[in-house]
Amino acid sequence: MARLVMKFGGTSVANIERIRNVARHVEREVKAGHEVAVVVSAMSGKTNELVAWVREAANLYDPVEYDAVVASGEQVTSGLLAIVLQSMGLPARSWQGWQIPLLTNDAHGSARITGMRPEGVLAGFGRGEVAVIAGFQGIHEPSGRLTTLGRGGSDTSAVAIAAGLSADRCDIYTDVDGVYTTDPRIVTKARRLDRVAFEEMLEMASLGAKVLQVRSVELAMVHKVRTYVRSSFDDPANPQAGTLICDEEEIVEQQIVTGIAYSKDEAQITLRRVADKPGVAAAIFGPLADANINVDMIIQVVSDDTTTTDITFTVPTADFDRAKVLLESAHDMIGYQSLQGATDVVKVSAIGIGMRSHAGVAAKAFRALADKGINIRAITTSEIKFSVLIDAAYTELAVRTLHSLYGLDKA
Ligand code: ADP
Ligand code: ASP
Ligand code: MG
């Protein structure tokens, strides 16, 4: 007997028919003798609708109440799945975040999990019940208020619960049959990977592959949760292979580049003719850091006269307006001639543990992109990835070009 966590995303529970299909996957594992905790998302589109209602209700809303509203989508699906399971003769009970409880801090809207008390769910296992857990939500115990874990947070609920229950495996059922070399919705030649190392998956998720929420991968890596991404659309009686997220040592055939990711969530800011003197970088990036704005790519150009320079960097699109206002108000302290911004940009990245031991991997990409007439606005590299910032109009072309360049296209 094993203990399993099975997580089903929004498209997998989009209507009652699909919830019945989910129940059949659960039934298969229960009949095989396993203890099962299921984590469900809201029906697809539901969370977007709830978020839109909150924004319509008030421009500046209380994040505590935002959580009260947006957590409701998961309450519905957890109850519905428990009802369907019961109707099939499988004992089941729904659990909201506060009932488990799954504990979080009070960063409403993107709360961090701080722990869980598994006794209630374990007692349910003892009674032969399937635990059907509402993903995406937890409780900040000191205030007694409900919290949510950020968009895509049910993945993180699932991995945290797998760790908290010492589960043997965490299966993430979604609308694709695993992790691909790039988003299969934009590159038809993308290939499913049998295995991906935790570190690579972490980079892929942080750099835009939304198949797993970044924090779920962090948690899986820290707690060594064997996480398996697979399709909920398989025949429940005949499940197919997916992708195992595992330790690097478990991967036999290592590629130099494992995957390509892209993100439109970044915006570019350029400060022209900034005085080229000590303290200038601190004057620019200090206020942004104080305002909790993450700066990612940074390039500084030394101009001909050597007394001034241009500095380009990126910030999350959501923080673009705030960053501009901050920099404009710090104009006199920094001393620059003009501020230019662009939001129609995309960051395309290549990820692979093999880059550690191979030189010139990124240089090859710069040539290939230039041959396609794609201009690179900024570059960053680190041990196992590099990223380029380009015009958003070239997203698909750039992703496809790099995908072929590194031999990732399926035959
Ligand atoms: P769920 O609702 O099940 O949580 P998501 O929509 O959050 O599903 O994540 C699955 C989607 O992630 C896929 O439909 C796919 O378009 C997208 N995706 C992006 N990059 C990748 C990748 N490298 N491999 C697989 N899917 C990816
Ligand atoms: N329903 C939530 C969202 O759409 C959480 C999730 O699906 O993972 O963000
Ligand atoms: Mg998701």
Image (cartoon, rainbow, N blue to C red):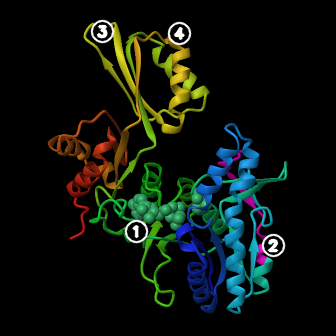
Q: Is residue 87 above or below residue 75?
A: below
Q: Position of residue 238 (x, y in %)?
A: 46, 89
**Residue plotted at (36% across, 54% down):** 353
Q: Secondary structure at mark 3?
A: loop
The residues bearing labels 4 and 3 have C-alpha atoms spaced at a distance of: 20 Å
Q: Which mark is residue 333?
A: 4
**Residue plotted at (48% across, 13% down):** 279
Q: Is residue 27 above or below residue 142?
A: below
Q: Which residues are magenta?
A: 105-122
Q: Earlier in the sequence, mark 2 or mark 3?
A: 2
Tell whether 316 sits left or right of 192: right
- Residue under label 2, please give it: 120
Tell whether 346 sits left or right of 23: left
Q: Is residue 266 above or below residue 212?
A: above
What amino acid is labelled 1 in the image?
Arg
Q: Secondary structure at mark 1?
A: strand
The residues bearing labels 4 and 2 have C-alpha atoms spaced at a distance of: 57 Å
Q: Position of residue 50 (x, y in %)?
A: 65, 55
What amino acid is labelled 4 in the image?
Met
Tell whether 301 sits left or right of 197: left
Residue 277 visible in this rendered orientation of the protein: yes
> Within 8 Å: ligand 1 and the Cβ of disc 3?
no
- Residue under label 3, please give it: 306
Q: Which mark is residue 195?
A: 1
